[in-house]
Amino acid sequence: MKKNFFYESFHDKADVVYLSHGGNVLTDAHFHRCIEILYVEEGGIDFEVNGVSFHAEKDDIVFVHKCGIHALKPAPSYRYFVLVIGPRYSEDFAAIFRTKTLPSHLTDRAFNKKLLSCFYALDEIKNISIAQETDRSNIELIKKGYTNVIVGNLLSHYKRVSVSTMPQIETVINVINYIDDHYSEPITLDSISDVFGYNKYYFSRLFNTYIGESLNNYVNMIRIQNIVLQAKKEESPNISELVFANGFDSMTTFYRSFSKMYDAPPSEVFKGAD
């Protein structure tokens, strides 16, 4: 099992709209379940996305599909915006990207520049101090709104292409997609090994090699993300109903897994305190 990239779990566990504005960072090959959009503000960057290399210049946009393996380095220097869209924030367009995606290198610079104001707006929202945030839920709505504007415009302007993956990770991505579809059902190492036709010991080693944690921990992370998403849509969520409806077999297991992802209790997180 050759591995020359890593699973970036931080963004998947945080599951937020994250914007960074900076530059001149050398980033090794990695992947995550989030969609990533990079806007080159100044300079040049050498990219590799799913084994395909290209050079991006000022006002180019780079689009990285869910689980796309990507790396970048300054060429020779750059400033950029990088927008990482967590799974629960991409639900509005998740179905669109199920079998199709955008090209990795989006080069209509005149068009791309029309979206630059959205990146600046997201950066301004990010820089609002906690003391100024009178209603965090409003901030999240605004972030999602600008994100949808960016993605919607890109989808309207650029022709979609088939989703491609690197051969050595294709099985792992299929497993991740399977878990996204079946997290509310009982999933064990034995059951999922049977689904994909692997010896369970080989499968366990494969999953840990690429994801960096056990299958059980990963499945519970996905369950918790979906519980939080569903709870935030309800005025008075019933925690136990949500827990068992999303695949947990006990409240003890849920609380143990929840504490690994959040420093606050479920009642606070459900109200929007991330």
Image (cartoon, rainbow, N blue to C red):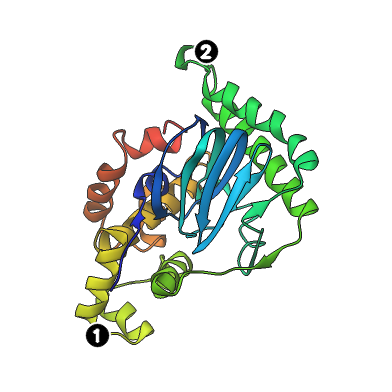
| Residue 183 falls in image quadrant | bottom left
Three-letter code for the amino acid on which mark 2 is drawn: Gln
Q: Position of residue 71 (x, y in %)?
A: 45, 51
Q: Position of residue 79 (x, y in %)?
A: 55, 31
Label 2: state its secondary structure.
helix
Instruction: Name the residue located 21 percent from the left edge and 52 percent from the top edge.
Output: 252
Residue wearing tag 1: 199
- The residue carrying mark 2 is 132
Kindly indicate the quadrant of the structure image that contains residue 266: top left
Quarter of image, res 245: bottom left
Frontmost residue, 2 versus 86: 2
User: Does residue 233 show up?
Assistant: no
- 269 in relation to 131, above or below: below
Q: Residue 219: where, in percent of width, then height?
A: 34, 62
Q: Amino acid at mark 1?
A: Asn
Classify the position of the C terminus by image quarter. top left
Residue 271 rendering spot, x and y as whole percentages: 46, 33
Task: Give the SS element for disc 1.
Answer: loop
Q: Quadrant of the N terminus?
A: bottom left
